[in-house]
Image (cartoon, grey):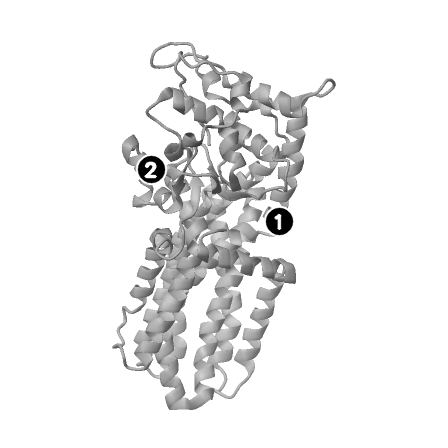
Amino acid sequence: MAISPTISTSTVLTIDDLLLELEPDLLRGAPLHVCLNRCGRYWVQESDQDQVNRLTRPAEQYHHFLSHDWGTSAWLKYVSLLIYYNSGAATLATILVSAALGVAVACDVLPEVAWMPVFGYLVFFTFLLFWQQLRRLVLRPMIVFLDKLCIPQDDEDLKARCIFGLAGFLDRAETLVVLWSPRYFARLWCTYEIATWLKNQGKPKPVVFLPVQISILFMICFLVVSLVQATTVLAETALLQSTASEWTVDAIFLLIGINAIMASILLPLCFFFWTKMFKDVAELHRQLTSFKVQETSCYCCTQRHRDPATGAVISCDRKLIYGVLKKWYGGAKKNYLEVFNGLVREQLSLPIQRKLQDNTLLLQYLAAAGLAAICPFFAMWIPRLARSYAEEGSIGLLRRLQPKVYLILLVLCMLHVSVLIGKAGVDLASCFNPILLACGQACFETLMCLMLWFPFSVSMFMTDENSYLPAVTLGVLFLVDIYLFYPSLTKACFCKRITMLIKALAGRH
C-alpha cells in the first residue's frame, strides 16, 4: 500500500502514533468478495463513504493484508487477485462441468452440438469472476485489509490515525499479499509495511509476492491455447467425414497452416510481455539484494512538504517512519537503517530467489490457464470416444484417446519451454530489438512444438491400430514432463501443493 496522505494541519503526529494500538472501532475489514466485486470498481474509481461503511465490518483478525502501491494499474492488480484467489476453483469447475456435459451427450441426454465447449468457457469465466460470491453461500467469507475500503476517506483526522497506525492492521493479518510491480520497493510506505511485517516477534508469517504482470501472461496463455485447440477441433470435425488419405495429408497441412498463422500473431505478443515480466522480476531480485530504505520515495518529500491543493505545510512521513525503525532496530552502536536494509536483503531476497528459480509461481497459474483452455472440449471428446468404443472396442478407444492425452502433455511441456525461452530473452534483450527478439522467440517456440508433435503424428498415421509406437512416444513426452516439473513433484512439494489447492478451493490460501 503506497499511501499519499494529505494530513490536515490540525493533526499533530509523533513517532509514538505509529506504534500505538488502534481503537476497536477503527479496525474494519472487507470481505474478499467485496474487493473483487463489480469488476474491481473499488480499485478503479472513488466510492461513496457511506456505501463503503456498509460493505465493511468490524474485524479482530484479517486473513490477508493486501499490500500495493496506487501508482500501478488498477486493472492489473484486480485481475491478478482474480487469478490468485479464483483460478484454481475456476479450472476445477470447468473440468467437472465439461466432463459432465460430455457424459450427458454420450448418454443421449443432451444433443451433440459443435458449440458445446462454449458452456465450459462460460463456467470458467463465471467462477473466475464470481467464485468468492459463490463460496460465501456455504462458507464464511475471507476478511482482508484493503486500504481504500478499511481506512475512512471522508475524515482526515481518522484517516491519518489509521494510516499512521498501520502496524495495528498488519499485526492482525495472517498473510501479507504483495501485489508487486517494479515500483513497489521504491515507495517508503510499502517499505514500512515490510518493516512492520518483519518485526513480528512470534512465528514468522507468510509473505506472498504476486507480480501483477501475471494477469497479462495468464490471459495471453489462455487465449493462445484456446484458439489453437479450437482450430484443431474444427479441422478435425470437418475432416472426420473425409477419407483416410485426405485425413493424413490435408489435416496435417491445414492444422499446421492455421496454427502457424495464429502463432505468427499471438506468440510474438506473448513473448514480448513475458520478456518484459522476467526483466521486471530480475529487477525485483536486484532491488532486494541492493535495497536501501534511504533511496525510497515518499509523497510528502516529492511535494516538498506542501499540500499541492492548499499550499499548507504537511508533516514529513520519512522522519516518522525512520523514528519507528530506530526504535525497532536501533541501539547505542547500531545504524538502524542499515540493520533494516540487511533484514530486507537477507529475509526477503533469498526466499524470492528460490521461488524464481523453480518457476513455481508462474507455472502454477500458466498450467491452470492451459488446462482451463483445453478442458471445455471434453464435452466434444467424450461423446466421440464413446462412439469409438462402441464401434471399435477398447483398441479403438485407446487409439482415439492417445491424441487427447498427448495434447494435454504437450501443452504442459510447452508452457515450461516458454518460461525458459522467456527467461533467455532477458539476457538477449540488450542485443536485439524487442520486436525482433519476440519474433525470434516465437519461431523457436513453434519449432520446438512441431518437433514434439511430429513424431507422434507420424506414429499415428503410419501404423495400424495394434501398434504400440504412439503409446511409446506418448510415454516419452510424459517422462519429459515429469523431468521438467520434477521440483514441484517431490513428496514435500506435492503434499504442499495439494494443501494449497484445497485451501484455494476454500478461498483461504
Going by the picture, which residue comes out furthest to the front?
Answer: 24
For label 1, count other residues whose C-alpha is less than 10 Å away and answer few (under 14), some (14-19) or many (20+).
few
What's the residue at 46%, 75% (across, down)?
Answer: 403
Side (left or right) of 78 relative to 280: left
Identify the amino acid type marked 1.
Gln
Q: Which residue is mark 1?
A: 357
Q: Determine the secondary structure under disc 1.
A: helix
**Image position, residue 504 (x, y; %):** 47, 55
Q: Residue at x 39, y 36 (%)?
A: 73
Q: Earlier in the sequence, mark 2 or mark 1?
A: 2
Tag 2: residue type? Tyr
For mark 2, what is the residue?
Answer: 42
Give the alpha-carbon distance from disc 2 to disc 1, as whole Å.
Answer: 35 Å
**Front position in the image: 397 or 315:** 315
Q: Is residue 418 above or below residue 251?
A: above
- Circle on res. 126: none
Circle nearer the viewer, 2 or 1:
2
Residue that lies at the very extreme toward the right in this rendered image: 333
* Marker count (numbered): 2
Residue at image position (58%, 30%) is: 195
Q: Position of residue 442 (x, y in %)?
A: 47, 53
Q: Quadrant of residue 161?
A: top left
Q: Position of residue 500 (x, y in %)?
A: 53, 56
Which of the pair 49/356 is nearer the observer? 49
Q: Secondary structure at mark 2?
A: helix
Residue displayed at 36% across by 69% down? 98
The image quarter in which residue 307 lies = top left
Residue 284, how many percent across, how many down?
56, 37
Can I make out residue 310 in this image? yes
Q: Is residue 107 left or right of residue 334?
A: left
Marks 2/1 in contact by CB < 8 Å: the verdict is no
